[in-house]
Amino acid sequence: MKILVAVKRVIDHNVKIRVKADGSGVELANVKMAINPFDEIAVEEAVRLKEAGKATEVIVVSIGDIGYQETLRSAMAIGADRGILVQRSGELTLEPLDIARLLQQIVEREQPDLILLGKQAIDDDCNQIGQMLSALLDYPQATFASQVKLEGQSLQVTREIDGGLETLEMPLPAVITTDLRLNEPRYATLPNIMKAKKKTLDIIDITDMDFTPLGQIKTLSVSEPKKRAGQCTLLSSATELVSALQAKEVI
Ligand code: AMP
């Protein structure tokens, strides 16, 4: 039983995002990057399934520039067995459906039984690729998973929905997207970071894939959110707050 996990490289969630002066995007030069947090959860879940004897191999895959090698090595330090990078130049713009089409080709090559993705990438917040991939493959999907149970060829996934939990059952192969409460990813230990450096990382140049970008979506501009109008005022008591609210001095 093979598990394939799709991993995106994003700006580390602790970094303050800066928009480029020309509004063409966000500043990436000399910025700390990390695995998309939902993808880290997906890798952790796949590794746990392997440790529980329910999977034999965990493969991590990315579509990205050369910097993605570091991200894939981090995923392998968590416990993935090998990585695949579909390498593209930094200038090439890909939209979610392009990424899903490229992942589809990797799925067709690798024939995994289970595909895990994050529910969304924290940089573009698209929340599209898992759903698109399952449609392209015509596989069943369970999005926003908060629990995964695998028994033989049957998969049970619990999802957090408005007002409760929904549990779905589906056959393999299937696509799952992970939510925050699925698990808490482990910290990679130094020996595992060292071991990850020796694991196989196959690099496929995007030009060797049967692929032409769709070019349907163009980013016109990126801008920072508007600054908040009101300044923060510190009041010393509830009485003062009530008076200020009555006088509409605070919002
Ligand atoms: P999105 O639909 O863009 O919010 O991304 C959803 C998920 O798709 C992410 O959490 C990743 O698992 C996967 N994904 C997005 N971009 C890439 C990429 N460039 N390479 C590999 N997987 C990706």
Image: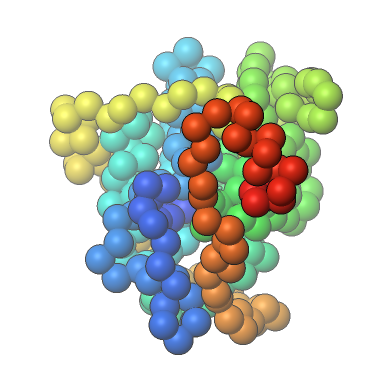
* Image: 188 above or below 100: above
The x, y position of residue 221, in whole percent, is: 58, 81
* Image: 76 above or below 215: above
* Image: 92 above or below 185: below
The x, y position of residue 126, in whole percent, is: 65, 57
* Image: 21 above or below 134: below
Name of the residue lying farthest toward the bottom: 22
Q: Is 188 displayed left or right of 224 in the figure?
A: left
Q: Say whether residue 195 is visible.
A: no
Q: Is 187 displayed left or right of 123 in the figure?
A: left
**Which residue is painted at 53% across and 18% down in the image?**
54
**Which residue is painted at 29% across and 35% down in the image?**
77
For the residue pair 179 and 95, the one nearer the viewer reads as 179
Quarter containing the N terminus? top right
Q: Is 114 displayed left or right of 3 in the figure?
A: right
Q: Say whether residue 51 is visible.
A: yes
**Which residue is painted at 42% across and 48% down in the image?**
13
**Which residue is painted at 40% across and 67% down in the image?**
18
The x, y position of residue 235, in whole percent, is: 52, 37
For the residue pair 23 and 91, the one nearer the viewer reads as 23
The x, y position of residue 81, in whole percent, is: 36, 35
Task: Specify how the rendered protein is coloured.
Answer: rainbow
For the residue pair 220 and 140, the one nearer the viewer reads as 220
Number of disc labels: 0
Q: Is 34 displayed left or right of 54 in the figure?
A: left
Q: Quadrant of residue 74?
A: top left
